[in-house]
Amino acid sequence: MSGAKNAVLPAMAAALLADGPVEIVGAPRLRDIATFGKLLGILGATVTQDAGGTDRSRLLRVASGEPGEAEAPYDLVKTMRASVLVLGPLLARYGRARISLPGGCAIGPRPIDQHLKGLELLGARTTLSEGYIEAAADRLRGAPVYFDLKTVTGTENLMMAAALAEGTTVLKNAAREPEVCDLARLLRAMGADIEGEGTDEITVRGVRSLRGARHEVMADRIEAATLLLAGAITGGDVTALGADGGAMDAVLEKLQESGAEVEVANGFVRVRRAGPIRSVNMKTAPYPGFPTDVQAQFMAYMCLGDGFSIVSETIFENRFMHVAELRRMGGRIDVSGNTAAVKGVQGLSGAPLMATDLRASASLVLAGLAASGTTEVLRIYHLDRGYESLENKLSSLGADIARVRE
């Protein structure tokens, strides 16, 4: 399995805090990681990545440098919302930051009010001007911060900011995602004093400086879930080497409910399905609930179920963009608000399809694997944001799939 994109990006941001280089082992070659590297370059960092190596041995190296304007421009932020992760590190290390507002996107807005609230509690002064967040602080000071709602990037931003703050910061109602825990591991290797990750309360005791470190990033649980669902939707047998079954409990439980056989061991997860697909209900939720990043792929799977399934999306307000394309393949799906009712059909038919976002594109590929005839997925640049050579990995599993043009 490739390293997790959603763990690599905050690790790259954390490198801005370090006096020496941070080496990230296992970083995949993805569009989002390249974009984030360009952003760090604008902020004075030097970013290099090995050209070869296997998925889990490739090395990404980030060495921070004094930024010029400490600014994340709109042209980069508009393409990748994780760019806001540089806000906390820039404030903590250099005392200033100017970041373009993320705004909305195809799957709905991702407000950063919780980021700003937390940084202000740590002593930052923030203003909004001409579409940019401008923030400054002489030195951040630790404080209790209660998040009004679970926010992964908000938790990560505050963890990084608090690492160099004076005193103790306690983050309450913090996100519990494995990627948050992965960032805590890196920050500790850099010399940070952090405990409580994986729970609702994370304590960070600020230190004067952080050093460079070498960090092996966690395996990508979303990529693993996508490949395992590819096996399940086609009635196949897929083993995801390097996947952490403990980070995928909610997905694996739903696969078992649907009639698939699941085997979890140290170092791999295996999914086999020989019988019919049982329709099951699913509701996305913050970790350890069912991840929103697997909702679209699971819906494609439920299109071939033996009855009705209800899919509820609670994280993003507009994350059913794939529904129209699945209907064009013969899927029977009715949407009302944040809920989709899926009536299983005997089979899907191949069709030309248009990807609308990263995970929607993966769902269309899975549906195409199980459909009769040929499926063409356009706008695959969405896919390349979060999956490295997905077509090659699926081909190695026996899929008849090829990239015909960018």
Image (cartoon, rainbow, N blue to C red):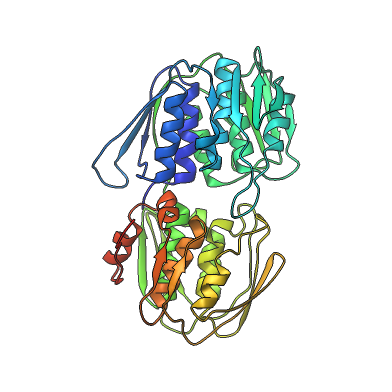
Q: Quadrant of residue 72?
A: top right
Q: Position of residue 152 (x, y in %)?
A: 61, 43
Residue 219 vs 344, above or below: the answer is above
In the displayed structure, 99 sits above or below 58; it is above
Residue sitting at the far left = 52
**Residue at figure coordinates x 49%, y 31% from the top left:** 13
Q: Do we see residue 258 in this rendering?
A: no
- Left or right of 59 on screen, residue 192: right
Q: Who's the residue at 61% across and 60% down the image?
A: 319
What residue is rendered at 47% in x and 57% in y? 245
Task: Name the one closer to the observer, 270 or 352.
Answer: 352
Residue 174: where, in percent of width, then height? 67, 40
Q: Is residue 151 left or right of residue 346?
A: right
Circle count: 0
**Residue with the most extreme front position:** 130
Quadrant of the image occupied by residue 405: bottom left
Q: Position of residue 113 (x, y in %)?
A: 71, 37
Q: Is residue 73 visible?
A: yes
Left or right: 156 as drawn, with respect to 263:
right
Q: Residue at x 28, y 71 (%)?
A: 398
**Residue 75 percent location from the top left of the image:** 51, 36
Instruction: Locate residue 148: give its quadrant.
Output: top right
The quarter of the image holding the C terminus is bottom left
| In the image: residue 194, left or right of residue 383 | right
Front position in the image: 322 or 180: 322
Against 159, residue 212 (above or below) is above
